[in-house]
Image (cartoon, coloured by chain):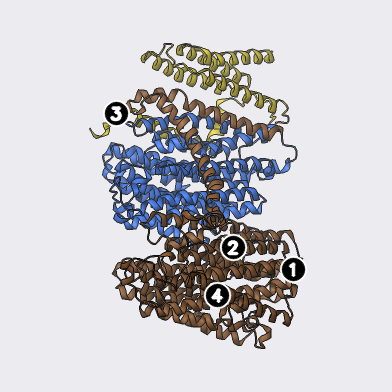
Amino acid sequence: MNILIAITAVGVLAMLSEILNFRRFLYPISLFVMLVALALTGMEWSHGVRYFNDMLYMDNYAVVFTGIMVVTTLLWFMMNENFLNGNPRQADFTAIISFALGGAMVMAGFSDLIMLFLGVEILSISMYVLAASNKSEPRSNEAGFKYFLMGAFASGFLLFGIALVYGATGSFNLREISEFVSENNTDMSAIFYGGVLMIAAGLAFKVAAAPFHFWAPDVYEGSPTPFTAFMSTVVKTAAFAAFLRLFSTCFSEVSTWWSPVLAIMSALSMLVGSIMALRQTSLKRLLAWSGVANAGYMLMAVVSLNEYSDTALVLYAAAYSIASIGIFTLVSNMTNAGNEEISSLHGFSKVNRFPALVITVLMFSIAGIPPLAGFFGKYAIFAGALKDGFVWLAVVAVLSSAISVFYYLKVVVAMFQPAGREAVQLEFNPGQSLVLGLVLVLVVVLGLVPALITTLI
Amino acid sequence: MSQYLFYILSLLTAFSAMMVVFSRKPVYSVLYMIFCFFTIAGHYILLNAQFLAAVHVIVYSGAIMVLFLYVIMMLNLNKESEPHKSNIAKTAAVVSGGLLLMVLVSVFKSADGLAINPAFDSQIGMVEVLGMVLYEKYLLPFEVSALLFLTAMIGATMLGKKEGGAQS
Amino acid sequence: MEQFIWLIPALPLLGFLINGIGNKSVPRGMSGLVASITVLGGFILSVVLFLQLLSDPNLVIQQKLFTWMATSTMEVDFGFMVDRLSVIMLLVITGVGFLIHVYSMGYMHEEPDYARYFAYLNLFVFFMLILVLGSGYLMMFVGWEGVGLCSYLLIGFWFKNNDYNAAASKAFIMNRIGDLGFLLGMFLMLQTFGSLSYDKVISGASTMSVGTPVLTAIALLLFVGAMGKSAQLPLYTWLPDAMAGPTPVSALIHAATMVTAGIYMVVRSNVIYVLAPFASEIVLIVGILTALLAAFVGLKQTDIKKVLAYSTVSQLGLMFVALGLGAYKTALFHVVTHAFFKALLFLCSGSVIHAMGGEQDMRKMGGLKKALPITHLTFLIGTLAITGIPPFAGFFSKDEIMASAFATNGWIFALVCFCALLTAIYMFRLYFLTFHGEFRGSQHQQEHLHESPASMTTPLIVLAILSTIGGFIGMPEIMHAPHLLSRFLKPVTAMAESYTSLHVTHTFEYILLVSSVSILAIVIWFSHRKYAVQKHVPAAPQELSGFQWVLHNKFFVDEFYDAIIVRPLRMVSSLGYRWIEQGFIDGIVNGFGTVATSLSAALRYLQSGAIGFYMIAMVISFIVVFFIQMFL
């Protein structure tokens, strides 16, 4: 609970800084409070407190996911020092991002469907606004508008689904719902099943899983790069944390009923995402499509609901968020230089040796090459799917990750090619270099000893 | 008695909702929407939720719709200048909407056994009871929704204010 | 000794770190020396380990470093295991590896990126050692991927050349296809046995009965992995292309060590294969087909390294034949002798290329025996060894393969013999074309012909000696000498031997010995006449016709793959790109004019089309999902 207070305090302070004129201190304050929030997250671990009539249940699952998201946000702040400091809208951005993180935390720890809906909405509304925040850029407006319209539509599905589940089970509370389901799992009414499907569709939209992914590439590409980074890390992690939490606690009894359809969604996402990513020439759009593919992998953890699902998802989400933040450090510099094409990276490794090394390692990790964190995330998820008998899904996943190696490697190869005409000078400020260093350490350490994070749950 | 009322209200709700979509002029759409909200408020009263009905009328039919009308009139949008949509898009929309309706209806018409079947309680819709629920059991969601509104507010001002306005 | 096992891989890793991090600041002389010494250190430790194992027949050293992942039903450890099989591989890797490191110091002396080269080479040795030292399939997989990565880096070492990059990517991608099989095999093992460590898997498998479907599936999936790494049909085409890398790399990675990883894997899992006769048959068939196909293609190649590359593919095929027959020790024997003579042949070819100033085409060589006496002599030894002439190393191992083939199936025996015949033909063609006849290169090249420096010839001589006497570790019964290797490996393949017996009569062995030697003699005489006396030079590709043309173009396998796999994939991708991206999204963008001009334009665009489509798509997919779930 204290975490939520600390996180929202950043937002409130950001607004006060406009009034009381201490904008200069806002950036260090936000970094500091994020660190405090991280410490508070650590203190919450293994207590398993249920707050306010079981509205929020900070079990280890919630704590670990909150930890991942707080760390990612901290890294996000560090990488965006230049973007935030001196920006006339720094206070707005800081406030919205911190509120969004609050929403994300609620999504990881909800114990009541109302809290789930509120969390989803806080996060989504923040993202609609941030996607559209570059007012002079039509693509940004387009992204915000698109995201808003479609997101509102998906929220409708989600809300309708929640209402139906409430109608069928008589409760919003996860524990009560799961009790009800396990008592009556043979004769649940059609209303309940309809509700589950609608919730699944709504959440599938939020995680950008095919066939509800149409918004993702456009929105990712159109949004200002810092916010794309936030979307593909914190937002995705939060949405999956909520997805798995809801489906594993409430609907696991009827999993044979809904898992085939989620399996199809997962396979579709992986294939569509990786095939489309193959042909992209813009790094940002490539990452958007690879985000769709990665949503497919993470969805596998939900499909193959077993005792490892949560560890597998935690590992994958952590590896993916960390790697993405690092890669987006590069993308945001490319955006500043005005060229997001992969070919503009030619000659990059000559000038920026360390960033090139780190990005290479991150690409390898995200492509699932051992012994990096991403490999183990994939491994855990694939193994889980096999264990649950989804052999075909695992085959599709391995196939798609084989394709993905190709396009991730394309970026690496581009970086190590001699400079051409298009070569752009990219500069990494100290904060960004620090982010890259931290990310490198995390990816390697998590790859060597994934138990560091999997034993936390 | 209340059964007839329910049918009449439902008919009116469905009719006005459809008219919101079919009206060519935005002002008419908004007026139909206000009407639609009133009929929904009627449903609330039928369900013994008086407070909700009142709030619904005040907030939706009052504040929000007035704002809509205000914007439309101020920007003088009340023309039939809507860009022409292709027939394919229209057909596709109608077909998919119809299919969705069909699927949902066919699923739920056979549905039985709602878990909720509470005994009638005349006080359930009263402000006092509602307040007790809201400030005791659902205190946290109530507070967290403040976060939601704050976010929306900041977002709206940020998108609304002039570029670089904060610097002056 | 046991507590120092970690040093064996750690030493090359140290060398990698020194050369990799120091890069340009390490003095040139130093980096080669550091790299070689670390590998030599590994070799010495391996010898000590070998002696220790020799004294105790039941010793298997198990070391657990740490638990990688543990849950209630499965446990995956990171640890080392040294038994008699791995120690043989250790000796080959570090021993041959050391010689090739020394050779590289001479071969690469003009290379500006000297330190980077040795860093990669050391990293490769490190991963290869991890591969054979690991105590389970996961660790093997780590090494497996690592050597793949190093192979990629080293093939593309001269990354400024785009063809070389393409070759590197090809190797990497083909290997990934194989890895897919390996990975699935591992998942299946994890599911079946709950562990990936060798002892648990082996003991779990040995309780099952012959032909259990899950064992067959595991064996086949693992074999898919082996097909990729050991260049078997249909995944072999990367290996000839991989010759783009520096020649010592070809010798180390693409002849002596990495490509034999697949054989190591099968030998390691021999219990599984014994219990999966169907999978073994597949191994046998794939092996023999690869051996023949590659040998045919090798007949008409004119690039000296390509001939050797196809010969490697063919020899690997023979090893798989042995594996398929259940003669696991024989396969390993051939791995060892092949490591000696094929490394020798590659290094010799490197010496030739070095002398010719980078020329690899045999049609431009000839008569080099005067200018390069040591290279000539050692190459001849290598050729005699590979063709299987007694008493050189290749004879013993190949003889064993033939004998096991004869004991099983006459047809296989005939095909193996035919393959051996082809080997002799292309190898002596290579030998006579290169070293005999008249010099056919340019004037400039002739003036610069020189024997290589001592750092290069010394490894050649050592390897030549090994190729000569290496076969004595496994003498056939008729020679009344003990089969040392077979005796040494007994504990590893004990289980397999109880299932298959591959014994032939002594009379047959005599017949085989005499007939093979006499046929080989005819081949040598024929080749000598054709290439050395009559001075026949292979025709240029455009003059070839019929079967020769097909052979020269390697049966068009690359073109075939391109047509059935690469192009369709590209087509799907570009169709998606064209229709959905360009046709649909871009079409809308273009249709509504220049979006970027003004906000209003963007808004108009937003209100019509795209989002509508997105929404409809969402609703329709929802309906489909709903319909399937609720009514079907």
Chain A image colour: blue
Chain B image colour: yellow
- Would you say residue A315 is visible in this rendering? yes
Question: Residue C77, relative to residue A367: is it above or below?
Answer: below
Mark 4: secondary structure: helix
Whether labels 1 and 2 share one chain:
yes
Estimate the x, y position of residue A53 in percent, counting from the top left.
Answer: 57, 42
Chain C image colour: brown
Give the amino acid type for the residue marked by disc 4 in the picture: Trp
Q: Which residue is mark 3?
A: B162
Q: Are marks 4 and 1 in contact (CB under 8 Å)?
A: no
Label 3, label 2: how many angstroms apart (C-alpha)? 65 Å
- Chain that bears disc 1: C
Q: Are marks 3 and 1 in contact (CB under 8 Å)?
A: no
Say the numbered circle drawn on residue B6.
Answer: none
Say the numbered circle drawn on residue C525.
Answer: 4
Q: Which residue is mark 1?
A: C207
Give the amino acid type for the residue marked by disc 1 in the picture: Thr
Label 3, label 4: how many angstroms apart (C-alpha)? 93 Å
Q: Residues within 10 Å of mark 1 (few under 14, many from 20)?
A: few
Label 4, label 1: how many angstroms apart (C-alpha)? 54 Å
